[in-house]
Image: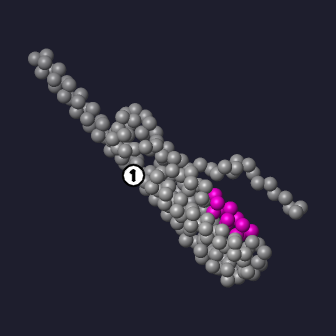
Amino acid sequence: MKTLIFAGSFGVLLLILMFGGCGTYNSIVSKQESVDEAWANVETAYQRRFDLIPNLVETVKGYADFEKSTLIGVTEARAAAMGAMRAAGESGKLGEFQAANNNLGVAMGRFFGYTENYPDLKANRNFLELQAQLEGTENRISTARTRYNRTVKEFNSKIKRFPGMLFAGMAGAEEREYFESAEGTDVAPSVNFSE
């Protein structure tokens, strides 16, 4: 009789552990899918930016005798950022993607700096519309990155805590990187109107 009770108790315990393990495994898989979805949303926001840039460049080309090096710099930086985005989506490594986007930001800064010399361009409706769309896109990118980081936090916490850490390997789950601010953004830019 004691043997039967022991075997029954052991069987019930084994079932509880099995169902608990399945639940933990499924939860890790769901969170991993949530991270992938959040990354896809980040890519969509960045793709919108990448799609707007050529339209902006073409509008400026029609209005101004722009330095070719500036336009080429923007185009090359855009292409590099798009390639880095694809690579980051495959590897989960965000460092190169963030560096490429920083380079794109620098190129776009030069680009907009030159547009200041063309009052007719600054008043052009297409240019103003594209500029407004680009600004809205930057807000979307910021929101998508914030949501991605929140999802990564939940995922990383799940696979690092017990019992998730026991099942993370079986689910093929590895810690994901966060988006972080670019180096030097902690220092406020100096503004000097006397130059």
| Numbered range of the magenta stretch | 102-113
In this rendering, position of residue 136 left or right of residue 153 = right
Residue placed farthest to the right in the image? 194
| Viewer-closest of 122 and 176 | 176
Q: Residue at x 65, y 79 (%)?
A: 59
| Viewer-closest of 83 and 180 | 83
In this rendering, position of residue 120 left or right of residue 172 = right
Q: Type of residue at label 1?
A: Glu
Residue placed farthest to the left in the image? 1
- Location of the C terminus by quadrant is bottom right
In this rendering, position of residue 134 left or right of residue 121 = left
Image position of 177 with respect to 125: above or below: above
Let me know if residue 117 appears in the view.
Answer: yes
Q: Residue at x 46, y 43 (%)?
A: 175
- Location of the N terminus by quadrant is top left
In this rendering, position of residue 114 left or right of residue 80 = right
The image position of residue 51, as x and y in percent, is 55, 71
User: Is 59 part of what is drawn in magenta?
Assistant: no
| Viewer-closest of 73 and 177 | 73
Name the colour scheme. Answer: one colour
Q: Check disc 1: other Cα within 10 Å, few if <14, some if 14-19, many if 20+.
A: some
Q: Quadrant of residue 138?
A: bottom right
Q: Residue at x 47, y 56 (%)?
A: 89
The image position of residue 16, as x and y in percent, is 25, 32
Magenta stretch, overall SS: helix
Check disc 1 and report the residue beneath it: 33
Q: Residue at x 37, y 48 (%)?
A: 30
